[in-house]
Image: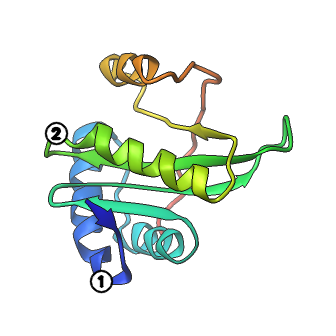
């Protein structure tokens, strides 16, 4: 596992498409994913393994004004999901975050249990509306 570079964007997009096909019912927009991934590689935390990645950003939390790391995409087909999460947590700590927020598809209760065992607690439900791909 290592920090991702711009050269990894194509591989991450392939993995993001697999995640999307297995977990989501919305249209996949490779151009949008590429734009987000490149932005996160340039200014966030992105880590990659041979068959997995995690990507996110640090931003001020509006409720408590603390710097919080927000996971945006997380996918592992190689059994290294926990390693990716830990790398993201370490990055978050290194950039001064006081908390990390992780998400998972609502139908994936097992992921929620794994996050719970890692010290995460449920905070909110998220409602999403997908806009057309430009």
Residue at x 47% of width, y 66% of height:
133
Q: Residue at x 26, y 76 (%)?
A: 10
Closer to the camera, 74 or 29? 74
At numbered mark 1, what does the secondary structure look like: helix, strand or loop? helix
The dot on residue 79 is 2
Decide which of 4, 23 is in the foreground and name it: 4
Task: Give how far across and how far down residue 61 sits, in percent.
Answer: 78, 44
User: At 25% from the left edge and 59% from the top edge, which residue is drawn?
Assistant: 1
Residue 30 point in image, percent of width and height: 34, 69
Q: Nearer the viewer, residue 40 or 95?
A: 95
Mark carried by residue 7:
1
Q: Is residue 33 above or below residue 42?
A: above
Quarter of the image for residue 62 reads: top right
Q: Residue furthest bottom?
A: 7
Q: Earlier in the sequence, mark 2 or mark 1?
A: 1
Question: Where in the figure is residue 110, as x and y percent of width and height?
Answer: 31, 18
Distance CA(mark 2)–CA(mark 1): 23 Å
């Amino acid at each position: 596992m290592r920090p991702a570079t711009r050269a990894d964007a194509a591989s991450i997009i392939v993995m993001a498409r697999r995640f999307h096909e297995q977990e989501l019912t919305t249209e996949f927009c490779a151009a949008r994913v590429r734009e987000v991934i490149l932005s996160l590689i340039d200014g966030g935390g992105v880590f990659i393994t041979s068959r997995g990645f995690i990507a996110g950003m640090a931003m001020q939390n509006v409720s408590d004004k603390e710097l919080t790391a927000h996971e945006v995409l997380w996918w592992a087909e190689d059994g290294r999901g926990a390693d990716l999460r830990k790398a993201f947590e370490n990055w978050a700590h290194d950039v001064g975050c006081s908390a990390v927020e992780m998400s998972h598809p609502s139908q994936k209760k097992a992921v929620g249990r794994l996050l719970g065992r890692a010290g995460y607690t449920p905070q909110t439900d998220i409602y999403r509306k997908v806009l057309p791909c430009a």
